[in-house]
Amino acid sequence: MPPQLTRLLIVFAVLASGLVAARHFLLPKTFGESGHYRTAAVEAITKQPVRYAGREACALCHPDIVEIHRKGNHQTVACEVCHGPAAAHVESPSDHQLPAPRERGYCPLCHGYDPSRPTGFPQIEPVAHNPLKPCISCHNPHEPRPPHVPEDCRACHGQIARMKAVSPHVQLACTRCHETPERHKTAPREARPDKPRTREFCGACHAQGASSPKEIPRIDLATHGGRFLCWQCHYPHQPELN
Amino acid sequence: MKDEGPQPEASGEKIYADRRAFLRTCAQGASAVLFILQPRQGEAAYSPRDHFYGMGIDIAKCIGCGRCADACKKENDVPREPFYFRTWVERYMINDQGETTVDSPNGGIAGFPAATNEKGMLRTFFVPKLCNHCANPPCVQVCPVGATFATEDGVVLVDKDYCIGCRYCIQACPYGARFLDPRTRTADKCTFCYHRVVKGLLPACVEVCPTGARVFGDLRQRSSPLERFMRMNKLQVLKPSLNTGPKVYYASLDGEVR
């Protein structure tokens, strides 16, 4: 073997062993076992303490409240939404008491009026709704229900009611256009209100020959709008004025 | 017996006795082995290979109460300052000029201020956001040291002890879901509450969502709440054009949401 080749081989051997040694010392333990990461990191993350105990834990000691809560309108609201993380309380109930928000500011986080909330979600205007009175003096948060069944549509459909209040249709009762089963007040999603099904319904006021006050805008039902129902183009809660 | 050697009948007896003893020993041994091997209750081994997690969010159900963002901070010790969020709620307001305003004061934890222009509002809704746990995560690609990674169960995690705080991943995330923890100077993000999920609990944000707008589940399981959510809704993901493969699926998502 020529001496150059021997020297070259030695250099390569030193480099290779240096690489192996460097890899051994520089690579952290458990790196690459299950991917391009330290498996130990996953274990470390798994050991993070749990703060929220989960909704099943509460029923073990508070079955009476859970039973009431299970049937009410707040059944989807877990105990820990209002009472805060409960894992420590589950571990040693006497050492870690859970808070119960009694102040007026808490409930409006969900129930304060905000137009961005889904229509139909129960909302109040905190400034106008029984000012200074804590919510829990009238409503039981474990089984909330309106103090009486809503008589007026605006209790739930405030957004539409406010819109209608400043529109030319302010004088029309909701039930004039929406045939509403009585059960809609107690089971709003099961018994839904109706909408006008014919063009002639709106035509009773807005058709050319209608016997309504003459400042009401008129259209010719035969030529206007084609096959569409009126509310498919116009928004009756806030009709355009021009 | 010893002196004379076994009698024929006695020898037969002994064989039966031996066999009985042998069988008894075998049975005891087998039951002992079974007892040792039996899975212990409560600490059944968690196998990441059997799971693949995702989340569903129904925009039509979100009331913007911000309880998810609050619970996330409490569960995961996220700094309370209003710049650090693993999950947060955005409010979208689209006016009749077609202009979109998005705000998220303190992530929605303390509620939203009254909308300024309610009359000219065309559409408005809340969008909860979090790490999308991409199947194709750009943050993992750019990490120079392998400190952020996707686990076999589809969760993107950060190795805090190994992160060098270079912030490449924060730049790379198209969803803005990462931040630099000011205490450790390492990247931090939503873990789908991995420490809870491996124990069979739900992520904290899903646990506290009062309207069920957030759904968590296993995409490998035919009967998980998430699978039902995905069957019953028309779904969208955020920024599908980036080909990141997000695993947070939105129902009733508006086209304006970025």
Image: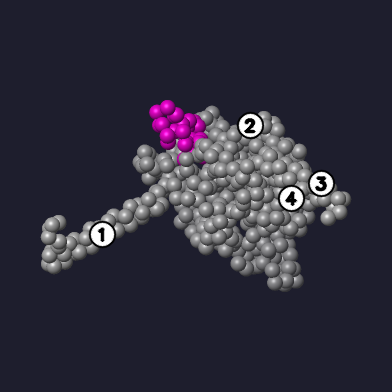
Q: Is residue A23 visible in this depiction of the protein?
A: yes
The spot of residue A140 in percent (x, y) is: 44, 38
Cβ atoms under marks 4 and 3 closer than 8 Å: no
Q: For the residues tagged 1 and 2, is the chain the same?
A: yes
Q: Nearer the viewer, mark 4 or mark 1?
A: 1
Q: Which mark is residue B22?
A: 1
Q: Which mark is residue B141?
A: 4
Q: For the residues tagged 1 and 3, is the chain the same?
A: no
Q: For the residues tagged 4 and 3, is the chain the same?
A: no
Residue visible at 62% across and 50% down?
A33
Measure the C-alpha gap from mark 2 to mark 3. 57 Å
Q: Please name the amino acid that badge 4 sits on.
A: Gln
Measure the C-alpha gap from mark 1 to mark 3. 65 Å
Does residue A119 appear to the left or right of A99 in the view shown?
A: right
Residue at image mark 3: A11
Residue visible at 65% across and 38% down?
B160
Q: Secondary structure at mark 2?
A: loop
Picture quarter with the N terminus of chain B: bottom left
For marks 4 and 2, the one nearer the N-term is: 2
Residue at image mark 2: B80
Stretch of the chain drawn in magenta: A79-102
Residue closer to the observer: A241 or B65 = B65
Residue visible at 44% across and 40% down?
A142
Q: Secondary structure at mark 3?
A: helix
Q: Note whether B230 is above or below B132 in the view shown.
A: below
